[in-house]
Image (spheres, grey):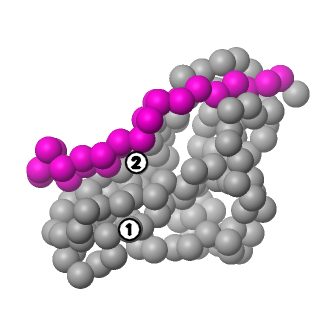
Amino acid sequence: TFYKLDGTKTDLKTIAQNERVVVVLKITESEARYAKLLVVDRLPAGLEIDNPTLFDSGSIDAFSWLKKDIDPVHSEYRDDRFVAAFDREPGQSAFFSVAYVVRAVAPGQYVYPPATAEDMYRPYHFGRTAFSSIEVTAK
């Protein structure tokens, strides 16, 4: 799900160059169980992750509308993807979210690849989002 910085939902079919949005991935398991879960969200070429230190440092006052469920044991903000690893335990909620901010940088039309979540040691336990498309318009 995509949100403007003020927390209002947006569809992200079209975004203006230099505009920023919050990407929220909601992971839903059939039941909470022990797992080493890896979440990977590949970005289309026209977007890049913006200021990842906002979330790592905990200074997310401007994003008070976001609910922080659990912390990843490891996260990476790469040029082309967001990666987070979670240690899941029985008894935890089967639903949790992770969020990061992206900025539109290069005008054009792009394919938005699906995000994936998989148990690193049981890869047959996995999930993914759908493909979509996005257009970044010149400012």
Q: Position of residue 93 (x, y in %)?
A: 33, 76
Magenta segment's dominant SS is strand
**Magenta-tinted stretch:** 112-138
Identified at 63% across, 49% down, the residue is: 2
User: Residue flagged by tag 2: what amino acid is it?
Assistant: Val
The residue pinned by badge 1 equals: 95
Residue nearer the viewer, 44 or 90: 90
Residue plotted at (35% across, 42% down)? 128
| Mark drawn on residue 47 | none
Residue 74 visible (yes or no):
no
Q: Label 2 belongs to which residue?
A: 83
- Above or below, 14 relative to 123: above
For badge 1, the amino acid type reads Phe
Furthest-front residue in this view: 30
Q: For the point 80% across and 33% down, which residue is it?
A: 16
To which quarter of the image does residue 46 belong? top right
Q: Is any part of residue 23 visible from this angle?
A: yes
* Residue located 21% across and 60% down the image: 36
- Circle 2: element type: strand
Residue 49 falls in image quadrant: top right
92 within the magenta span: no
Instruction: Name the residue furthest right.
Output: 139
The image quadrant of residue 136 is top right
Coordinates of residue 107 in the picture (x, y in percent) = 74, 21
At which x and y percent is residue 134?
A: 64, 28
Between 97 and 80, the residue placed more toward the observer is 97
Total numbered labels placed on residues in the image: 2
Nearer-N-terminus badge (1/2): 2
